[in-house]
Image (cartoon, rainbow, N blue to C red):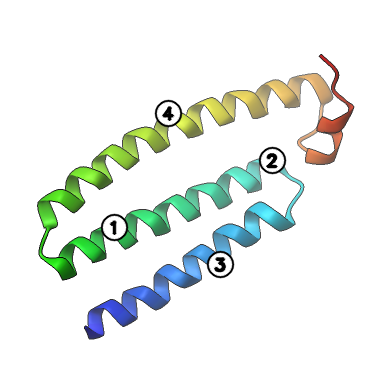
Amino acid sequence: MRLFWSYGLFISILCIIGFYCILVTYNLIRALVGLEILIKAATLLIIVAGYITGHEALAQSLVITLIVIEAVVITVAVGIVLGIRSHNNSLDARKIRNLKG
């Protein structure tokens, strides 16, 4: 149980950092980094929960699935951010509101 509290504290800190990066910044790359940190916190939470409950195989399969989905989502998001960058010459999220289409 002590292991859960130490990892739980670390997971909570990662979640706070991830949410902070997403909510506070206007830079799209920093928002993607925040999303990555948040997903890594969820991955670590699944691993710790699987270890504590004794279902390591299930936790590993869920984590592998999450990593694959995360790679696809981040790849698409980076493509969108690069498209916005080429159109606006800026990574500022406030300038996205000016786009029409």
Q: Amino acid at mark 4?
A: Val
- Residue at the bottom extreme? 2
Q: In the picture, residue 7 is in which quadrant?
A: bottom left
Disc 2: which residue: 28
Give the CA distance from mark 2 to mark 4. 17 Å
- Label 4 environment density (alpha carbons within 10 Å; few <14, some 14–19, many ≥20): few
Give the CA distance from mark 4 to mark 3. 24 Å
| Dot 2 or dot 4, earlier in sequence | 2
Quarter that holds the N terminus: bottom left
Q: Is residue 53 above or below residue 4?
A: above
| Dot 2 or dot 1, earlier in sequence | 2
Residue 92 showing in the rendered view: no
Which label was assigned to residue 16? 3
Disc 4: which residue: 72
Residue at screen point 63% across, 25% down: 80
Q: Using residue 101 as the reference point, say whether residue 36 is left or right of it.
A: left
- Label 3 environment density (alpha carbons within 10 Å; few <14, some 14–19, many ≥20): some
Give the CA distance from mark 3 to mark 1. 17 Å
Q: Is residue 3 above or below residue 20?
A: below
